[in-house]
Amino acid sequence: MAEGMEHEPDSGGVAMTLTRPVAVVMERTPLASRWQSDKWEAKGVLPDIFGEAAAPRTLYDDGKRLEVLYPGFEIRLKGEELESYFLNLTSPQPKAFVLVRADDGTPRPACVSLSYARGAGWMDANETVDAVPLPPELHAWVGEFVERYYRPRPKFKRARK
């Protein structure tokens, strides 16, 4: 659990941030469309063994389909987002959310989060977000964080007049 642990002041709840390096796999597939020749989308998130200085590397290229690994990203778990991580983990299919931008014309990952709220916020801002299956290593990591620190808010009933 101590991997990438930082303590930072927090106004309520858990005053800690955990970090984990990850890499994103992007896939380009051809489209039969006169408006767009291909489609790029995130296909997966993996623990990063290369580091942030590593360059993207081609994993597969058959002339039609292309897979590229983009290392150098970091997932941050923050105490104030515990409920959002809990909701993600207890959903039928937990996801990692990848923010994708095409600043130079080619879509590339820009950020990765495990927070439902952050992923939804990006979508509300009209960003391109791909939700990919959460790999077992990251599921266990965020699960330990949630199990250790998440406490549901107590439910209360309003008194009727």
Image (cartoon, helix red, strand yellow):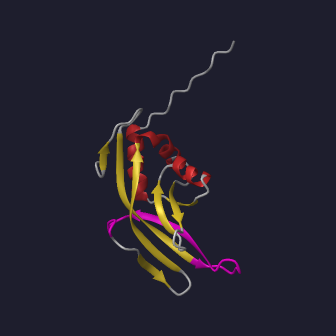
Front residue of 97 and 133: 97
What is the x, y in percent for residue 146?
A: 42, 43
Can you name the residue that lies furthest to the right here? 34
Decide: is 60 above or below 93: below
Q: Does the magenta-highlighted stretch encompass residue 16? A: no
Residue 1 in view, yes or no: no
Residue at point 35%, 48% (across, down): 18
Query: Where's the C terminus, which quadrant?
Result: top right
**Quarter of the rendering containing residue 148:** top left
What is the x, y in percent for residue 28?
A: 55, 76
What is the x, y in percent for residue 142?
A: 41, 49
Residue at point 47%, 52% (across, down): 114
Front residue of 51 and 133: 51
Range drawn in magenta: 29-53
Can you name the residue that lies furthest to the top here? 161
Front residue of 156 and 99: 99
What is the x, y in percent for residue 70?
A: 42, 70
Front residue of 149 and 34: 34
Q: Does the magenta-highlighted stretch encompass residue 42? A: yes
Residue at point 35%, 52% (across, down): 19
Residue 10 in view, yes or no: yes
**Quarter of the rendering containing residue 14:** top left
Decide: is 64 above or below 53: below
How many labels were placed on the picture?
0
